[in-house]
């Protein structure tokens, strides 16, 4: 909240801007079918536009979301994506939180290596998504599901 | 009530016509037909031994009448409110009829309760059916879209083009691949250009589907070029770590076409030599 106060003092225009962007920040998408991946991409694209990302960053974030959502759908048996817009030092960002109740990832470091796959995919999804985002965290419990939190900041 | 079937149906039609003045839609003769069927079914439904709140769902004739009405409305593009109001307007028509036939307030009250429970059941059924009808339309449209959205066009002699628009999931890849391979065979094509200008997101799954398609095209002895790779997509693919270096790619469809023409013209002796057929 102190960060929010800071932004408000630096520029009034920026504050209303981020306030507007905070609206889609609470978007939640439930993933149960393959068609929901489309909903995910649309929701994330709309959020990237609202936050003010450029065209390249939009594509990066949407692609990362698509990878993570597909992982949750295929390996986790579905899940929930939450999109929000965190702030730091007056900068805006977009945070994706994808949570599934699947079997979890036994070895996260191995799963992040390119070419690692347990299914029929290319094995670039998780590692690729990490490269597309600025911050990336995988929390997983064997048998207890997986949560991936990935954030991209708007370049200033 | 039995003797007043005609009157109730009339009244219901009139109420619906009043509502329709606001929304428009079903014609009066259709309404009349629906009303006759439904009120008749209602009477037989009341004669049956079923508990009153289950008459609408369990009585076959009444169930069918309500279902047909709701499906017709859904297919005809009526709003859910209009459909629900149409069924609930019957409640009003019935209540008016009861009010005219009795003055005893106790009797009136119990009749009103009965009508309420009966019509609430019908209303719920109507809404269920309406939604089901709409969902059926959506399913049909998505199947149609799948067929429409994957044309294979002849761009040049022995050169085919596939302009992809939207997303490339497993089902779509299958359709694209089937159409393309068949067209390669039918038109003796030697180069296929897959244009992804209209694909907003290329993630690993889309890339994998593209590679599968390219492999299948190569197995048939044709070359495959992927065109329409925009700068953000190129950056994203590179960062994802997907290796498309074994696939011929071009930034635009016109680049891909000129490359394809070179490829098809290559083996010929000279461009103006008489064709040997």
Image (cartoon, rainbow, N blue to C red):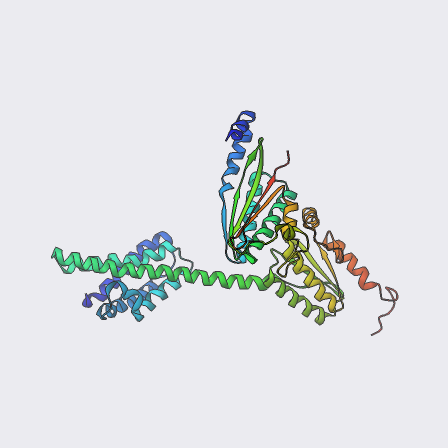
Q: Is residue B154 visible?
A: no
Horizontal side, residue B173 vs residue B39: left or right: right
Question: Which of these two is toward me, A141 or B178?
Answer: A141
**Which image quadrant is residue B132 in?**
bottom left
- Above or below residue A15? Residue B273 is below
Q: Is residue B54 visible?
A: yes
Percent across and percent down for residue B277 are: 82, 74
User: From the image, which quarter does the N terminus of chain B lie in?
Assistant: bottom left
Q: How many marks?
A: 0
Say which residue appears at 18% left-offset and 68% top-offset.
B3
Say which residue appears at 54% left-offset and 25% top-offset.
A9
Horizontal side, residue B144 vs residue A155: left or right: left
Percent across and percent down for residue B64 are: 34, 68
- Above or below residue B265? Residue A5 is above
Percent across and percent down for residue B198 are: 64, 53
Question: Which of these two is toward me, B109 or B25?
Answer: B109
Residue farthest to the bottom, as pictured: B277
Residue farthest to the left, as pictured: B104
């Amino acid at each position: 909240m102190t960060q929010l106060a800071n932004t408000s003092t630096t520029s009034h225009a920026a504050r209303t801007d981020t306030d507007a962007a905070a609206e889609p920040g609470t978007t939640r998408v439930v993933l149960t079918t393959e068609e929901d991946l489309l909903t995910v991409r649309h929701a994330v694209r709309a959020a990237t536009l609202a936050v003010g990302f450029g065209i390249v960053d939009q594509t990066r974030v949407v692609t990362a979301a698509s990878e993570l959502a597909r992982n949750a759908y295929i390996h986790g048996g579905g899940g929930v994506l939450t999109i929000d817009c965190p702030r730091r030092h007056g900068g805006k960002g977009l945070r994706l939180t994808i949570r599934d109740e699947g079997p979890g990832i036994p070895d996260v470091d191995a799963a992040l290596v390119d070419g690692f796959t347990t299914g029929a995919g290319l094995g670039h999804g998780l590692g690729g998504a990490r490269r597309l985002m600025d911050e990336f965290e995988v929390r997983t419990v064997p048998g207890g599901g997986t949560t991936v939190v990935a954030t991209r900041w708007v370049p200033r | 009530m039995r003797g007043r079937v005609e009157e109730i149906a009339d009244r219901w039609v009139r109420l619906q016509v009043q509502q329709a003045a606001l929304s428009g839609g079903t014609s009066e003769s259709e309404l009349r037909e629906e009303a006759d069927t439904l009120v008749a079914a209602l009477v037989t439904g009341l004669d049956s031994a079923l508990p009153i709140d289950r008459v609408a769902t369990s009585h076959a004739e009444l169930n069918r009448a309500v279902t047909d009405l709701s499906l017709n409305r859904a297919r005809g593009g009526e709003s859910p409110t209009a459909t629900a109001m149409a069924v609930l307007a019957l409640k009003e028509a019935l209540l008016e009829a009861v009010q005219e036939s009795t003055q005893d307030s106790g009797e009136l009250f119990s009749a009103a309760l009965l009508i309420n429970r009966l019509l609430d059941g019908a209303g719920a059924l109507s809404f269920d059916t309406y939604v089901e009808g709409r969902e059926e339309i959506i399913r049909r449209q998505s199947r149609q879209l799948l067929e429409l959205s994957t044309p294979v066009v002849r761009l040049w002699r022995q050169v085919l083009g596939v302009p992809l628009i939207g997303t490339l999931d497993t089902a779509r890849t299958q359709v694209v691949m089937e159409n393309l391979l068949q067209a390669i065979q039918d038109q003796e094509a030697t180069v296929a250009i897959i244009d992804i200008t209209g694909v907003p997101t290329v993630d690993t799954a889309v890339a994998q589907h593209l590679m599968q398609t390219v492999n299948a095209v190569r197995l048939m002895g044709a070359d495959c070029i992927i065109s329409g790779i925009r700068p953000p997509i190129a950056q994203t693919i590179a960062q994802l770590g997907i290796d498309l270096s074994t696939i011929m790619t071009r930034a635009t469809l016109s680049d891909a076409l000129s490359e394809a023409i070179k490829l098809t013209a290559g083996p010929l002796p000279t461009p103006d030599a008489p064709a040997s057929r």
